[in-house]
Image (cartoon, coloured by chain):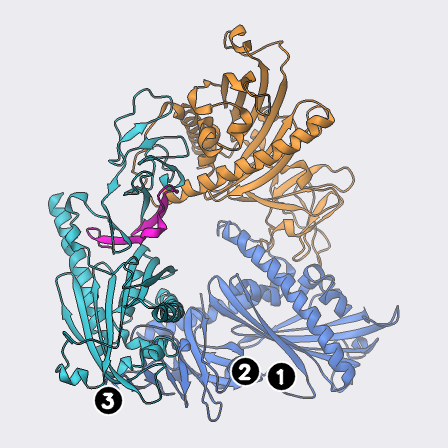
Chain colours: A blue, B orange, C cyan
Amino acid sequence: MFLRNCWYVFGWSRDVVAGGKPVGRVIIGQPIAVWRSDADGRLHAAEDRCPHRHAPLSAGQVEGEAIRCLYHGMKFGTDGRCLHVPLLETAPDISIRIYPVVEKDSWIWIWTGDADKADESLIPDAFGLDNPDEPMQANSIEYDANYQLIHDNLCDLSHVDFVHESTLRLASGAWWAQSKPRITTRDRAIRFERWFVNADLPGGQSGEKVDTWIAYDFVVPGIFIMRGARYPEGTAARCGMQEPVGIEPHTRNIEQQAVTPIDEARTAYHFATGLIGNTPELTQKLAQRMGVVIAAFAEDRTMIEAQQRIWNRTDPSVEKYFLPQDKGPHLMRKLMERLVREEREAASQGA
Amino acid sequence: MFLRNCWYVFGWSRDVVAGGKPVGRVIIGQPIAVWRSDADGRLHAAEDRCPHRHAPLSAGQVEGEAIRCLYHGMKFGTDGRCLHVPLLETAPDISIRIYPVVEKDSWIWIWTGDADKADESLIPDAFGLDNPDEPMQANSIEYDANYQLIHDNLCDLSHVDFVHESTLRLASGAWWAQSKPRITTRDRAIRFERWFVNADLPGGQSGEKVDTWIAYDFVVPGIFIMRGARYPEGTAARCGMQEPVGIEPHTRNIEQQAVTPIDEARTAYHFATGLIGNTPELTQKLAQRMGVVIAAFAEDRTMIEAQQRIWNRTDPSVEKYFLPQDKGPHLMRKLMERLVREEREAASQGA
Amino acid sequence: MFLRNCWYVFGWSRDVVAGGKPVGRVIIGQPIAVWRSDADGRLHAAEDRCPHRHAPLSAGQVEGEAIRCLYHGMKFGTDGRCLHVPLLETAPDISIRIYPVVEKDSWIWIWTGDADKADESLIPDAFGLDNPDEPMQANSIEYDANYQLIHDNLCDLSHVDFVHESTLRLASGAWWAQSKPRITTRDRAIRFERWFVNADLPGGQSGEKVDTWIAYDFVVPGIFIMRGARYPEGTAARCGMQEPVGIEPHTRNIEQQAVTPIDEARTAYHFATGLIGNTPELTQKLAQRMGVVIAAFAEDRTMIEAQQRIWNRTDPSVEKYFLPQDKGPHLMRKLMERLVREEREAASQGA
């Protein structure tokens, strides 16, 4: 079950190099090639399938802004039209499918559905890797698991206490399973907000305490945008447990993560973590933090791939027990189901 | 095709450590977690599937005698009842399936069928690793093959001459394909008995001869219990080719092996070999013997996995040619088929 | 879709050693064991499946000219008849299937269809590795791809310019996608002939030019036999662009390659390259050439396996665009389809 009419993160901007080779990846089962024009570095995306013999265009080469298949030499322009075929005087009237592609906040976004429905306003704001005042470090991994298990994971952070006991939990100083976030539904996203009151200050003097504000959106089809901040003890109460506005925190961290289904059994995960500020001390702290984040996501992968293997051996009729913590995952699954259903209904009415 | 109402060997007692982590394995397609109480080391077995999100409990931790899922923190007692859920004041009225588990002769036995039918008298006697007068060495391997191919192998030892020509055949001094064992059927087992008359004494002076008595039971659902003994030449005749009773042999060896299906395509194999006696010389001989046994079972695995690949490429309608040597494998397959059929009939009548 | 009544290349003559072990391989899904008589080295081929328990005979041993299964000891003669079974006084009246096998031009050819239809005249002439005046170097690789993708590749060498730009294209001095070969259909083969006029002489003085004649047959079920020769510039015109007869070339190269389907998803490829002549200089040149050929076929494999992965993700209803270059692949696919259809019709009429 995949949503088609939405923006998926193909990867990081840096993954596709101007003057370099095209990059081929699979999103929701669709092979897609992405490349940059040699001259201006503009991004282009097309089906990764030469119409001639269905060889991958990503095994080809960029020529100016066009892409040439390196199996038998067919060349295609950025509008998808064939520009040249060896031995033919005029290029034939055929085209490859072009995907809407957008570069924003250091991510390459691909619209996998009907091109005429592509709506850039649906791309959520993230942070990107290029803001010197908001330095981030980025990485990508792949899961042998269905993307919805990763959605579940990101929509219920109570697992931090258990899966990430010695990594993220320790680094956060908070106990995530002991309080519930406030969850609100938006049009194509779910917002999670919470205070951790009187949390330990990691690395601080013994007994030092802080109030920590954590807010994140999980946006269709799998974009995780988080802001965190540490405040003096008592701030949460002074804000009436609401979002702190106009109060300067001790420290601020930002996270951007994207869940991109490769197919039903495999999923890509593109993540970055950042610390707001621009000092040598922060640069060093960020490197440490990235180490913790990489270790933590390896913990997630181990758990989720093991969970997937149990699912594979379990009759789908076996029910799962719903906990209060499941509100977030449940809302996200319902949201995805509704959007997929609406998309399919619209498609069948159009047909 | 699996028998459910029976005791499968989960593994060796030593595989699950008190104060250590739970161990997750799959038996006949069922994921099962086994752990020990911290205090008394008592064994517990449960479905390896948290009812919450179907994560494996074996990725969790032991707390006292309970087990806690380390995905979102649900905790279960040894009766399977939920003891604690983060954020809930009272634990919900749900349970995980508990498997009957027994520790006997250094093996962990699991009853995979209906718990109320679990009958400990069906567990055959083996030797175990803890008897100082019967020292054994143990190991486990896995096959990429269906368990019935391994049953076949163990119920027709004529293959020793061919598969194990330079290992077990040489070590036994006997020619296994040149005489037939006496085969008798029991309720849930098949017994194999034979004399090797006038066999070479391995490692003995050139020309030294012995009579060797070999008897083993192959017990449902795949337990191999063997006793062997070497006697002075002429003993077999003096016993009228019957079981030697009250005669002291030169040497005695014991073997215990268990075939445990993981699923239809993969099988675990837990084996130990021993030499009866308690001398430094025997200890050294046992280490040598274990080397031979490990080499021999690698030979079996190579052959059986190759056989499985041929079966995978062969239409099931292609017949197999029955030889006298197949009596044992045939009886065992018939026995398993009858028990599975009876079990299914009983289940459908109960339903 | 496989043709059965034809000769497939099992491998190189040297792959099966007299006095050595049998060799088991799979051709069009059929496991086949090949061995040589100890005394005279004559080849024998049989189904690689003991009729007893379907173990692979190739895991067995050669005894004289017979083959013995090393699982339980059944022995079979070169006519397939059982010669011996342990414990039986007389061998039972059963047989294994014997495949017609021929050794010719350093290849082992197996007829996979009805033995009584085996017609050695259908084996095309190649060169072999044993002619001192036509030295060749040989190798084998396997593809994770359907054999027809490799047929396509070999029947349209316009891909040389793109896939092999820095290997075979450079070594040939020609531009393969800029001219069309003359293609003619034969009974069970397709012939490709072409002149490259005014091509660069690789490794020659800058600006040196040659005319190069290339002719090859692609013979059912996947045999590629090529002859190439370089002539003084102007030779092509003097021959009226026809085959050069009675003119001595500067250099001549020969190629023999065989595409052997293992199953629908995997294919073996046996190839050799040679330079005609018998001088130390040629021996050195041949070693260099083999390096180029091995590199080039690794390029093919990378492309074709990537193409196969795209096909696996593509609905078969998605059409492919036909180019003039596809005439060869198209004729070969049509030829294979017709032969398979005829074979099936004959089989159903016979039934």
How many residues crowd around disc 1 within 10 Å: few (fewer than 14), some, or many (20 or more)?
A: many
Quadrant, the C terminus of chain C:
top left
Please say if A130 is above or below C159: below
Please say if C177 is above or below A53: below
Identified at 31% across, 38% down, the residue is: C39
Asked if the residue at tag 1 contacts the one at tag 2, i.e. Cβ–Cβ closer than 8 Å, the answer is yes
Looking at the image, the residue that sits furthest to the right is A206
Looking at the image, the residue that sits furthest to the bottom is A39
Question: Which residue, given by chain and number where applicable, does mark 2 sit on?
Answer: A13
Looking at the image, the residue that sits furthest to the left is C349
How many residues crowd around disc 2 within 10 Å: few (fewer than 14), some, or many (20 or more)?
A: some
Q: Indicate left or right for A195 with C102 as reference.
A: right
Identified at 75% across, 87% down, the residue is: A246
Give the mark, 3 or 2, whose residue is nearer the N terminus.
2
Please say if A242 is above or below C287: below
Q: Report x, y in % for residue C257.
A: 29, 62
Q: Nearer the viewer, residue C61 or B333?
A: C61
Residue B208: name its quadrant: top right
Q: Chain of mark 3?
A: A
Question: Which residue, given by chain and number where applicable, does mark 1 sit on?
Answer: A129
Residue C59: name its quadrant: top left
The residue type indicated by label 2 comes to Ser
Q: Report x, y in % for residue B74.
A: 67, 53
Give the mark, 2 or 1, whose residue is nearer the N terminus.
2
Please say if B283 is above or below A71: above
Cα separation, mark 2 vs mark 1, equals 9 Å
Labels 1, 3: front one:
3
Question: Which residue, given by chain and number where applicable, does mark 3 sit on?
Answer: A90
Cα separation, mark 1 vs mark 3, equals 44 Å
Give the magenta-colored segment's residue range.
Answer: C1-29
* Residue C18 magenta: yes
